[in-house]
């Protein structure tokens, strides 16, 4: 089976890491993948697929090799944001590539790749079109008018998509509530999490310059409003003995730095984007997830494997991982940063609670193994192919 996987950009986010993991896992299962991405935006941390073992092909080489091509191709016109002319060029390039590399399945990830990639796949006559929602931008990102327009767009695309995948039940429920498609059309497939080698706690602390007996918390995510990293900073206001690290970068960096100086002194550090953050998690006493919402936070799964307890707000995505799929402490959003701090304090003061939380979390790690996820996806592709692929387009579309 030939799978063309399309992702908007190769940044440090979960979708790209999953795409690299699936490239290898599908190869092991006998499926060949051509990974197609756009370009990383200004100020974003890049994740080079070649560093993850996916060979890079330039555009001409991919066209010349045709059906024999395998690896990673970058389309410079595929990019985030509003770019109508670039979007048209990216769509044409994808259609041209599909004529030379006849995919059995075109599987898109993230919003922009989904919009352009699914249209190109349908026009190129792809047998099966799949799309994974790693979350969504239908609320909490844009104003009402833009959100309504995006809902209409996603609804029309969903009607022409053969396999709709959500990375959590919460994500699927929200998409159905927004009218994107009926709930029964969404298949929940957890993200593939590539498990990096873990450093022992002492070695991880030494690399990060953390004292052996210091109580230390971590927060991992882009420094953007949806991640609500300011709440992580605020929980240190009344906890003078605690220290913390933020891994990630983004437009809120300057504001967070100022807030750190105001409420936490030198006890919280902005460490920037760290590609190897998963291997460093054993250095920490807990991971905190203060996000407004998540699709399915991969870093929580990495913390599970590292034996690090996780505390987060009871919001979509986070509740799936810390509740049904693993183990962690959920805090009502109304409790705010003080509530996050109180939950962490329960862990700090209760070794038995920490041990039980870690044990429950580790029990759920297996479902995220790349081979398990890849096998589940191949089953969905084969079922769609046997069914003849395609759904009726509603009259309103």
Image: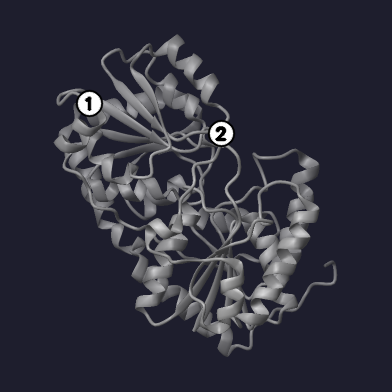
Q: Looking at the rendered structure, which numbered label has been put on residue 72?
A: none
Q: How is the image coloured?
A: one colour
- For the C terminus, which image quadrant? bottom right
Say whether residue 39 is left or right of residue 357: right
Q: How many marks?
A: 2
Say whether residue 263 is left or right of residue 115: left
Q: Quadrant of residue 376?
A: bottom left
Could you say where residue 20 lies in the image, as x and y percent from the top left? 43, 62
Residue 117 appears in the rendering: yes
Q: At 28% from the left edge and 25% from the top edge, which residue is drawn?
A: 345
Residue topped by disc 2: 224
Say whether residue 211 is left or right of residue 20: left
Q: At 55% from the left edge and 83% from the top edge, which residue is drawn?
A: 67
Label whose residue precedes the other's in the sequence (1 or 2): 1
For the residue pair 372 and 176, the one nearer the viewer reads as: 372
Say whether residue 278 is left or right of residue 1: left
Could you say where residue 271 lies in the image, as x and y percent from the top left? 38, 29
Q: Residue furthest right?
A: 395
In front of the other: label 1 or label 2?
Answer: 1
Q: Kindly report the distance in space between the C-alpha atoms of the residues bearing marks 1 and 2.
A: 26 Å
Could you say where residue 299 lies in the image, as x and y percent from the top left? 38, 46
Q: At 49% from the left edge and 47% from the top edge, which residue is drawn?
A: 46
Residue 327 appears in the rendering: no
Q: At 24% from the left edge and 52% from the top edge, which residue is drawn?
A: 197
Residue topped by disc 1: 210
For the residue pair 385 and 77, the one nearer the viewer reads as: 77
Question: SS class of the residue under badge 1?
Answer: loop
Could you say where residue 253 lies in the image, as x and y percent from the top left? 52, 25
């Amino acid at each position: 089976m030939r799978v063309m996987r399309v992702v908007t950009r190769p940044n440090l986010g979960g979708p790209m890491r999953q795409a690299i993991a699936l490239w290898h896992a599908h190869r092991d299962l006998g499926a060949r993948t051509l990974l197609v991405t756009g370009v990383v935006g200004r100020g974003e941390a890049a994740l080079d697929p070649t560093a993850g073992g996916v060979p890079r092909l330039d555009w001409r080489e991919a066209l010349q090799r045709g059906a024999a091509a395998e690896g990673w191709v970058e389309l410079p016109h595929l990019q985030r944001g509003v770019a109508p002319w670039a979007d048209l060029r990216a769509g044409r390039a994808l259609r041209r590539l599909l004529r030379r590399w006849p995919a059995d399945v075109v599987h898109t990830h993230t919003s922009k790749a989904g919009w352009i990639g699914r249209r190109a796949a349908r026009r190129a006559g792809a047998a099966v079109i799949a799309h994974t929602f790693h979350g969504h931008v239908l609320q909490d990102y844009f104003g009402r008018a833009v959100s309504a327009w995006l809902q209409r767009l996603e609804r029309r695309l969903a009607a022409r998509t053969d396999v709709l995948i959500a990375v959590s039940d919460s994500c699927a429920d929200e998409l159905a509530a927004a009218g994107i498609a009926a709930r029964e059309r969404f298949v929940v497939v957890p993200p593939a999490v590539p498990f990096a080698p873990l450093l022992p706690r002492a070695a991880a602390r030494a690399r990060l310059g953390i004292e052996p007996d210091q109580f230390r918390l971590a927060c991992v995510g882009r420094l953007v409003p949806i991640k609500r990293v300011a709440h992580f900073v605020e929980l240190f206001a009344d906890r003078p003995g605690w220290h913390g690290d933020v891994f990630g970068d983004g437009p809120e960096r300057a504001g967070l730095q100022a807030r750190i100086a105001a409420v936490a002194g030198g006890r919280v550090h902005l460490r920037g984007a760290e590609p190897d953050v998963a291997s460093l998690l054993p250095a920490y006493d807990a991971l905190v997830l203060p996000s407004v919402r998540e699709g399915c936070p991969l870093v929580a799964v990495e913390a599970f494997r590292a034996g690090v307890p996780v505390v987060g707000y009871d919001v979509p995505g986070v509740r799936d991982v810390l509740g049904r799929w693993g183990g962690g402490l959920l805090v009502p959003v109304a409790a705010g940063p003080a509530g996050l701090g109180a939950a962490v304090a329960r862990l700090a003061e209760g070794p038995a609670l920490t041990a039980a939380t870690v044990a429950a979390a580790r029990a759920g790690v297996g479902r995220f193994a790349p081979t398990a996820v890849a096998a589940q996806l191949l089953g969905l592709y084969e079922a769609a192919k046997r069914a003849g692929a395609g759904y009726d387009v509603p009259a309103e579309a």
